[in-house]
Image (cartoon, helix red, strand yellow):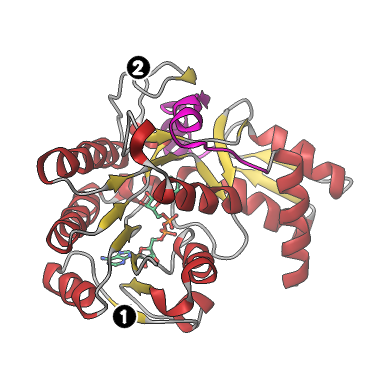
Amino acid sequence: MKRILITGALGQIGSELTLKLREVYGENQVIATDIKKDNSEAAQSGPFETVDVTDFNRMMETAKKYKVDTIMHLAAILSATAEAKPVFAWHLNMGGLMNALETARELKAQFFTPSSIGAFGPSTPKNHTPQDTIMRPTTMYGVNKVAGELLADYYFYKYGVDTRGLRFPGLISNVCLPGGGTTDYAVEIFYEAVKNGKYTSYIDKGTYLDMMYMPDALNAIIDLMEADTLKFKHRNSFNVTAMSVAPEDIAASIARYIPGFEISYNVDPVRQSIADSWPNAIDASAAMEEWGFTWAYDLDRMTKDMIENIKKKK
Ligand code: NAD
C-alpha cells in the first residue's frame, strides 16, 4: 500500500487528487501538505501538514515523520502568474522541485510531478505535437517545465529514483478554481454560463489548445504511478490530452445545455501570446502505448458534467 505525501495539495489538482488517492489507498495513507491550511475537504479529511516547499528541512522532516514511499509534487506557480513574477517563479518552481527530488532520493520514494504543454514553444510543431520534439519555450513557466522534465530524468538515470510525469494540457474542474494559468478561461466560462448566461473571453476565438477534464487527469496520474515500467521509453514528460478546443467550441457546447449562451472577446495580450506559443493539439500516442493512457470525457460529456455540478453549488 502506498504512503503518499502531496505538496501543493490545496490547489486545483491537489484538492481533488488528495480525495481520490484517499479513496483508493485509504485516508491515513495520503498526507496533504500546502503552504497554508484551509477548510477544504482535502485539508480536513486526513493527515495535513503545513509545508513550504522552498524549506527543504521542513519537507524532509514531514516526509520522514509519516514514512512516505511516494512523493507527488504539485506546488508551483502557473504560467500567467510566473510571467508577472519570473524570478519568484524560478525560485519556487525549481527550488521546490529540487527539494522534492532530494527528499525522494533520500527516502528512496517514488516520485511524480506534472509538466505542461507550456514546455513547448513557438518553434514546436503545432499539430500532432510529437512526444519528442523541439522544446524552446518563451515563457518562464515553460523554461521551468523543460528544466523540470530534464531534472526528473536526471534523478532517475543518476540515482535510480523512480520519477514519473505527465505533460498536462489545460485542466478543467469544478472543485477548486484554477490558480493563474493561461487556460483558466476554460473553467471560468462554465461558472459565468451558469451565473449570467454569457462570458467575455480573454483568449481569442480560433485559439486551439489541448484540454482535459479533471477526473481523467486524476486517473492518468494513478495509472502512470501504478504502471509496470517494462514498456517505458519515457518517464517524466508523457503528452496527455483529451480534446483540442477553441473558446467558440466550448461556447457551442455550453449553448446545447444553456440555450442563448453568448460568448464575446476582450483579449488579454499577455495570456494570448502565451497561448499562441503553445501547440494546438498534442499527440498522446506514447502514453497510450507505454502505459495504456485513456480518457473518458470529450467536450460535450465534460460540459454536461461541469454544468450539473456548478448548478448543484448554487
Ligand atoms: P494551483 O495554483 O491551483 O495550486 C498550487 C498550490 O501550491 C496552491 O494550493 C498553493 O497554495 C501551493 N503553494 C504555492 N506556493 C507554495 C509553497 N512555497 N509551498 C507549498 N505550497 C505552495 O496549481 P495546480 O493547477 O493545482 O497545478 C499543480 C501542478 O500541475 C503545477 O506543477 C502545474 O504547473 C501543473 N499543471 C497544472 C495544469 C492545470 O491546468 N491546472 C496544467 C498543466 C500542469
Image point 62% across, 53% down: which residue? 188
Q: Nearer the viewer, residue 93 or 238?
A: 238
Q: Nearer the viewer, residue 126 or 287?
A: 287
- Image depth: mark 2 or mark 1 in front: 1
Q: Is 25 positioned to the left or the right of 160 in the image?
A: right
**Residue 23's quadrant in the figure?**
bottom right
Task: Report the number of numbered marks.
Answer: 2
- Compared to residue 166, the image places residue 290 above or below, namely above
Residue depicted at 37% across the width and 50% down the height: 78
Q: Could you tell me which residue is drawn at 61 percent across and 45 percent down?
A: 186
Q: CA distance from mark 2 to mark 1?
A: 42 Å
The magenta segment: 267-296
Question: Which sits earlier in the primary sequence, circle 2 or circle 1?
Answer: 1
The question of residue 272 being in magenta is answered with yes
Read off the residue under disc 2: 123
Identify the secondary structure beneath mark 2. loop
Residue nearest the observer in this picture, 40 or 201: 40
Q: Write the residue at 70% across / 39% down.
A: 299
Place of residue 51 in the rendered image (x, y in percent of width and height, measured from the top left): 26, 74
Task: Please state the horizontal and vertical placement of residue 212, each as a whole percent of the image.
Answer: 58, 43
Residue 172 lies, with reference to residue 70, above or below; the image says: above
Local packing at callout 2 (Cα closer than 10 Å; few below 14, some 14-19, many 20+) is: some
Q: Position of residue 131 (x, y in %)?
A: 39, 24
The residue wearing badge 1 is 49
